[in-house]
DNA sequence: AAGGCATGTCATGTG
DNA sequence: TACACATGACATGCC
């Protein structure tokens, strides 16, 4: 077992009591802290053992933290730059106020509360440093209290002063609690490892190919859309729309509702069915009255007529309104669109409508509902954009926070490596072989094996072993 | 006149 | 199956 690794100078550092002090060729008069480098797992040196492991982990961690490796690249990033307003983000960011004000106490804790789904940013840090709850790295530079106790003890030990000498023979160094070095074993060593109109038949949507006034005055009476010049004049008068706010506006009553024919209007039902009963009322005067009160147009179709810029000029009728007017649909577009399906069907039973009228009514209902749906859809889309912009601002603040932590972490790594180097120098200065020759830091390094022992290993052998 | 924007409409998918 | 709803795509009109 001792010869498992070849090319390694069989040195072993131990701080346990020396069972065979006579084998020592020298003494290292080091403080007890220094002898904490011993790796035998006695209660006394377990702490330093852990510290050593953490130092090794830090070295590995630094190697892991390659300069070109940006952990933030992994953060889902919404590429919404064109519509991002930095000013807007600032208003949605809790971070500029919360993070600086609180990170002195528990930076990661606060941060975690702000971004619970993102923690921990450096899980390996928690693992190595034992910083519970992800606390930690940002305070390492200014206050090393954030270190795991064993690591802290080692850092304290790095400031130790050495006394005496360490003797190495046959590769194993054994430190007394008083700093003596003992040779234990030389080879007990292990290596480190469009619009398609198909659904809307011409019968139902005769105006799909008609846009504009001249084209909208068909003469084909058989289609049911024939209009007289008087209708064209009436189309310039439209009622007020009782559109609800927040995309719930509906089709309005329209003058056509005042043209129920005697054949289409079963007056006997008008008194029992409230939606239809309203039709019994003279709609046109009311509509005209509303029109005078409110000429604005909410949620209506685009009109082929030029929009009115003066309140004194009536807003023209929508396309479906004109169609309904032309076909003498005996109820309002508002009812067509907004009535529940049962009520709507019941409404249809109240009248005798021909195929063209039925098709138009159903088309109006379909388009009307879809129009509201489209409005709601667009509203949600805008709300989503606002929400995503807010999230983007938070993520940017989070990125900046992590970048600061990363910088502090790297700075701490540099400090630790520097101190570790000093520690090695101090340790090596106390060691010499049987002939009294010192071991050079450039030629030898300390390595810990899985069994917990620390060995003085020639660097070329260590490289070969790796 | 071109482009952006708002809105209506259709087609399609989903529940 | 019918219906309501959501949504992408397209058309249209206005500025």
Image (cartoon, coloured by chain):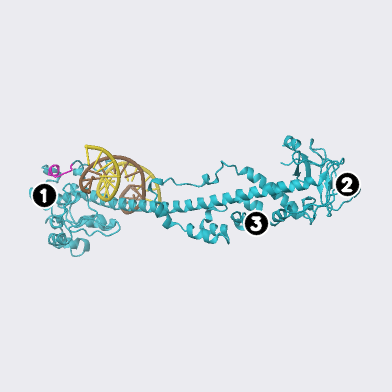
Chain colours: A cyan, B yellow, C brown
B2 lies above or below A134: above
Q: Around disc 3, counting alpha carbons within 10 Å, would you say few (fewer than 14), some (14 to 19), or many (20 or more)?
A: some
Q: Nearer the viewer, mark 3 or mark 1?
A: 3
Chain letter of mark 2 equals A
From the image, tell me which residue sits under label 2. Answer: A24
Q: Earlier in the sequence, mark 1 or mark 2?
A: 2
Q: Which residues are magenta?
A: A210-217
Q: Earlier in the sequence, mark 3 or mark 1?
A: 3
From the image, tell me which residue sits under label 1. Answer: A232
Which of the pair A361/A310 is nearer the observer?
A310
Q: Report which quarter residue A185 is drawn in.
A: top right
> Which quarter shows the C terminus of chain A?
top right
From the image, tell me which residue sits under label 3. Answer: A144
Q: Is residue A216 magenta?
A: yes
> Which residue, as the protein is rendered here, is positioned at the far bottom?
A271
Which of the pair A121/A397 is nearer the observer?
A397
SS of the residue under disc 3: helix
Cα gap from disc 1 to disc 2, whole angstroms: 118 Å
Q: Around disc 1, counting alpha carbons within 10 Å, would you say few (fewer than 14), some (14 to 19), or many (20 or more)?
A: some
Identify which residue is drawn at 47% across, 46% down: A77
Identify which residue is drawn at 51% across, 58% down: A114
Overall secondary structure of the magenta stretch?
loop
């Amino acid at each position: 077992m001792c010869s498992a690794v070849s090319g390694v100078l069989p040195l072993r550092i131990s701080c346990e009591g020396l069972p065979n002090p006579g084998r020592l060729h020298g003494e290292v008069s080091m403080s007890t802290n220094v002898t904490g480098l011993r790796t035998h797992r006695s209660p006394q040196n377990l702490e330093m053992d852990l510290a050593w492991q953490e130092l090794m982990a830090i070295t590995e961690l630094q190697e892991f933290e390659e300069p070109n490796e940006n952990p933030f690249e992994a953060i889902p990033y919404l590429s919404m730059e064109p519509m991002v307003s930095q000013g807007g983000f600032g208003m949605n960011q809790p971070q500029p106020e919360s993070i600086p004000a609180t990170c002195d106490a528990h930076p990661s804790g606060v941060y975690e509360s702000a971004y619970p789904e993102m923690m921990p940013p450096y899980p390996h840090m928690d693992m190595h440093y034992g910083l519970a709850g992800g606390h930690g790295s940002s305070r390492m530079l200014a206050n090393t209290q954030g270190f795991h106790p064993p690591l802290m003890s080692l850092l304290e030990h790095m400031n130790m002063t050495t006394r005496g000498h360490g003797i190495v023979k046959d590769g194993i160094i054994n430190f007394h609690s008083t700093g003596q070095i003992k040779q234990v074993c030389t080879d007990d060593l292990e290596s480190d490892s469009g619009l398609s109109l198909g659904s809307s038949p011409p019968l139902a949507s005769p105006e799909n190919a008609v846009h504009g006034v001249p084209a909208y005055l068909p003469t084909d009476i058989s289609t049911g859309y024939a209009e007289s010049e008087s209708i064209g004049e009436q189309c310039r008068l439209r009622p007020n729309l009782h559109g609800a706010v927040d995309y719930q506006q509906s089709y309005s009553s329209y003058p056509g509702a005042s043209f129920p024919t005697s054949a289409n209007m079963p007056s006997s039902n008008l008194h029992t069915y409230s939606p239809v009963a309203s039709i019994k009322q003279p709609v046109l005067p009311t509509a005209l009255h509303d029109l005078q009160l409110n000429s604005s147009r909410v949620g209506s179709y685009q009109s082929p007529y030029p929009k009115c810029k003066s309140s004194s000029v009536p807003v023209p009728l929508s396309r479906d309104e004109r169609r309904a007017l032309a076909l003498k649909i005996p109820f309002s577009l508002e009812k067509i669109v907004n009535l529940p399906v049962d009520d709507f069907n019941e409404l249809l039973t109240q009248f005798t409508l021909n195929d063209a009228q039925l098709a138009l009514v159903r088309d109006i209902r379909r388009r009307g509902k879809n129009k509201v749906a489209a409005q709601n859809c667009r509203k949600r889309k805008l709300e989503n954009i606002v929400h995503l912009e807010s999230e983007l601002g938070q993520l940017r603040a989070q990125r900046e926070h992590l970048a600061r932590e990363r910088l502090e972490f790297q700075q701490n790594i540099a400090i630790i490596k520097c101190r570790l180097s000093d520690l090695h120098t101090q340790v090596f200065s106390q060691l010499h072989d049987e002939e009294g020759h010192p071991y050079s830091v450039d030629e030898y390094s300390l390595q810990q094996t899985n069994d917990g022992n620390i060995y003085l290993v020639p660097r070329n052998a260590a490289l070969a072993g790796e």
